[in-house]
Amino acid sequence: MRFYLIPLAAAAIPLVANPYTQFMVNLMLVYILVAVGFNLVLGNLGQLAFANTALFGIGAYTAAMLMAHAGWPFWLVILPAGLAGAAAGFLASVTALRGIRVYYLAIVTLAFGELLRWSYIHGERVTGGTDGLAVPRADFFGIALDSETARFYVFLLIVTVLVKAVSNLLRSRIGRAIVAIRDNELATASLAIPTGRYIVLAFALSGFVVGIAGSLFAVLIGRVIPESFGLIELILHFAMVLVGGLGSLFGSVLGAVALTALPEFFRRFPGMYEMFFGALLIVFLLAQPRGLAALAARWWPQLRDRYYRDR
Amino acid sequence: MFALQLALSGLAQGAIYALVALSMCVVYRATTIVNFGHGDLVMAGAFVVYLLAVLAGLPFLAAATLAVVLLFILGLLIEIGLIERIKAGPHIGFALMCIAFGYLLRGIARAVWGREVLPMPSVFNFPPVFLGELVITADALVIFAAVGLLLAAFFAVFYRSSAGRVMQALCQSERGAALVGINVRAFHGVMWGVGAALGAVGGVLLAPITLLHPGLGASFLIKGFAAMTLGGFGSFGGAVLGGLILGVAEQLVGGYVSTKLIDITAYLVIILVLALRPNGLFGRAIAEKV
């Protein structure tokens, strides 16, 4: 039950927020899903992957295209966006199961992400090319999502359900297999766990969560453009998971909340954004490789990551 | 004739890819770390040479030499200051560290240059060579000569000299090499330096023939990977051949299908090779763990 205290407390935010801070809080909710989904692959599976922005983008584009071209309401496109993300996660990981897995998976996901971005730019007819695609007014079971507050409550509901689902998943047979593969793939395989299948499954599950994050992002921003899902965005995703704490679910939430607002500060100075996040990653890797979650766990031992073993 | 001309300009591009792939391979073989920030080292090489040659007014050859030396030192410092420090952690930390310093370098380049795209004035002004109807531009000639010499020197050192034998021993077994008194840590630092310097040569050769922008590194990273994958991951000769093939393939695809596809040829190569021949064209089958 303690899990639900956080969203319950968060439900009071609109009482004190102005529209801009409310927008930022909504963006934080989107990035919580992004980080939680990415953490499944990067932290829990321990697999380097670059496809996260691609999964995010495919969710956003699926939602935007279904809403703009097919006229579907928002609530109906959430699941397809997640499924499209899952399919992309499956595709990005399945080819790499042949070959030297560790690096090939990373490289294929890098190529996959750029390939998708290329197709957004050149698929003008359906994606709007570099100008992007405007997202029509969103509607959640009859409630018009035209204010930040309305979006907040819908997003909060979706994020709470998904984060709880991931939390349960990590404690299930699947989650334990995924973490076991990170710690020792050979030993895991010797327990008759088909590691290849679990790796693909982890990518697909991660894609599902991140794809749904993409659909929320599309509705929140109101326009999807290829630039939103490029390498600039990727470092933000990496930073959220790492700063929060690799492998820690709570850490990912913390990382997303801590970093979402930062890119705004760097918009006016070219290069500052990349320098800051590059340096931030370096500092955390050197000084606090287990992230903010490990720091928080010092004062609040219940938060300690039960799936991590120091090596 | 058209095809031959395309192939020729592809070979010049491919020679640079070959160099980039080889330099990534050096770091990978020596340290088992795949450097995901390598493209940004190539970009840094190109930018340093631009800075020295165009803004500081040094002669091109001096600027190029200085850029390569500076990048060697940068590579060494990255190994000592960043990579060595996180040895105790999980292996994924190395890759994240490489990504992080890559972004840092890119950010520095962007902060210095802003959002402009910089053309570097042409350096090699001697006339092109005509072979029948084929034209070999001065830039291509310089690239062929420089890459050819460098590759010859690299392979001679690696396979023939006693320093090369030490390197080979280390590539085969670090523990074994340490047991016979080879300084493994110094070797790692030097190989990072060599990798960065070789990549910088790629950047230096690239600077006069392309538009410079800080995002350059990302595409070279992927092209280097494509070349390595094509040639067999971790094989020096394979990386070189893979780079040449990729360069030619890009030009042929651009000339006969669509120029839009040049950008994604490398991605398609990676995905196709892994789907059809995961060990690459020249790679030996590596026993798969699990």
Image: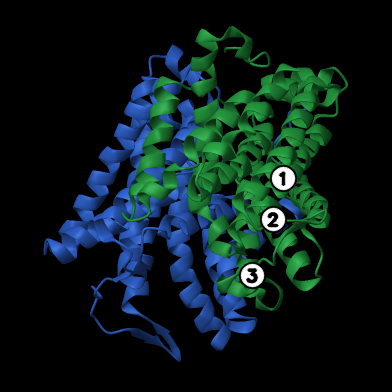
Label 1 vs label 3, nearer the camera: 1
Quarter containing the C terminus of chain B: top right
Give residue A145's mark.
Answer: 2
| Front-lying residue, B93 or A117 | A117
Q: Which chain is blue?
A: B
Whole-angstrom CA distance, mark 2 to mark 1, is 8 Å
Whether the residues at callouts 2 and 1 have beta carbons within 8 Å, the answer is yes
Which amino acid lies under the numbered mark 1 shown in the image of this protein?
Val
Mark 2 vs 1, N-terminal side: 2
Which amino acid lies under the numbered mark 3 shown in the image of this protein?
Leu
B169 displayed left or right of A279: right
Q: Is residue A138 in view?
A: yes
A117 displayed left or right of A177: left
Mark 3 burial class by Cα count in 10 Å: few <14, some 14-19, many 20+: many
Q: Colour of chain A?
A: green
- The residue positioned 83% from the left and 26% from the top of the image is A174
Which amino acid lies under the numbered mark 2 shown in the image of this protein?
Leu
Q: Is residue A306 above or below residue B114?
A: above
B184 displayed left or right of A116: left
Q: Chain of mark 3?
A: A
B208 displayed left or right of B165: left
Residue at label 1? A154
